[in-house]
Amino acid sequence: MMKSGIRRRDLPAWFFDLVPQQRVKLAPLPGGGSLNSIWDFAMAPDGRCFVSLCGEGRRPACARVYEFLPLTSIFRLCLDAGRECQVFGRAIPPSKIHTCMSFTHDGRMVMATHNTTPAPSHPAWMFDQYYSHLWEGFAGANILTLDLKSGDVHNLGVPVPRDSIYGGIIDPRHNAFYFMSYLRGHMHRFDLETREVQDLGQVTEMGSFRLVVGPDHHIYGSSRSGWLFRVNVDRRRVEDLGVSFADNRNIWNARQRNLHHACVGPDGRIYMTAVYTTSCTPMTRAAASWTSSPCRAPAACGRRVSAQRHGPRFRQRRLPLVWPPLADRQ
């Protein structure tokens, strides 16, 4: 447990009374076995809820997507990645759908596969070591669409061979799917009409996932080390914001502090938290620059957790990454 962490036993007895108990429903997910984690949850514009059931560990697994039916408290299977993707028997399977489920204007949910379980003959997850292996590697992540009305599933193919998709989001203005690759840390744009793939260059060291559409309709994210960027969806360019989440003073945050959760508040600001931090920070677009101010976490255990002391602070500095790709430079 981190020093700045809050343990459940430290919370007051009334803490969980804040959740109306008559509205809480408990329903077991099907699957079991190697499917032991959830890495995405999305609510459609019509209020329907979808969840990805994923696998982590030492046993091969293929991810599934379920819809939760609140009237009956059951989960309805929508797709099985093992059935929709071409998975060779000796290969690393598509065990996850990770932080990428989003919706188009024409009633489809778009998502992509990822992996964190081993190939059948591997003793552990060995993606870094075997991603390029012809038979025991990973051919690449598949982009899948689910028609919310008919239930039809379509596989749009593998946009980036021998890499995985760790996070993605729809650009509703141009009907495109933006996503970050896991190993190489590149931002890509997938046109849902023409299926053209464009590599916008490296935006992270590796393994960043969260993207959010801002109030200006552009897409925001960060590198694994916490440097923030904006994808200008009109120019199809990545723009360095020159700010970073600061060290949260614990060993985990020193290794990784990429954007974890983000949303646009009713005041038009983007509220963000970083991995292994205890607070959130709003960002405001002011003229041609970005400004930020720390929030305070809710009071807990008789003390206040200050974002200025424990949470993400921002400092001015340039992002030490390279984009656009060399081939696109003038």
Image (spheres, rainbow, N blue to C red):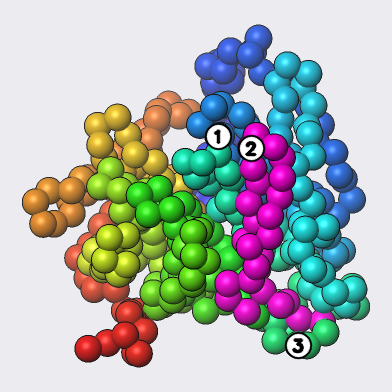
Q: Residue 162 or 308: which is nearer the viewer? A: 162
- SS assignment at label 1: loop
Pick out the residue farthest to the front. Answer: 194
Taking the magenta stretch, the answer to whether it contains residue 137 is yes
Q: Residue 250 or 224: which is nearer the viewer? A: 224
For the C terminus, which image quadrant? bottom left
Q: How crowded is mark 3: few (under 14 residues within 10 Å), some or many (20 or more)?
A: some
On screen, residue 302 versus residue 7, left or right, reads left
Of the numbered discs 3 and 2, the one sitting upstream in the chain is 3
Q: Residues within 10 Å of mark 1 (few under 14, many from 20)?
A: some
Measure the C-alpha gap from mark 1 to mark 3: 38 Å
The reply to whether callout 3 and callout 2 are in contact (CB within 8 Å) is no
The reply to whether callout 1 and callout 3 are in contact (CB within 8 Å) is no
Of the numbered discs 1 and 2, the one sitting upstream in the chain is 1
* Mark number displayed over residue 44: 1
The amino acid type found where label 3 is placed reads: His
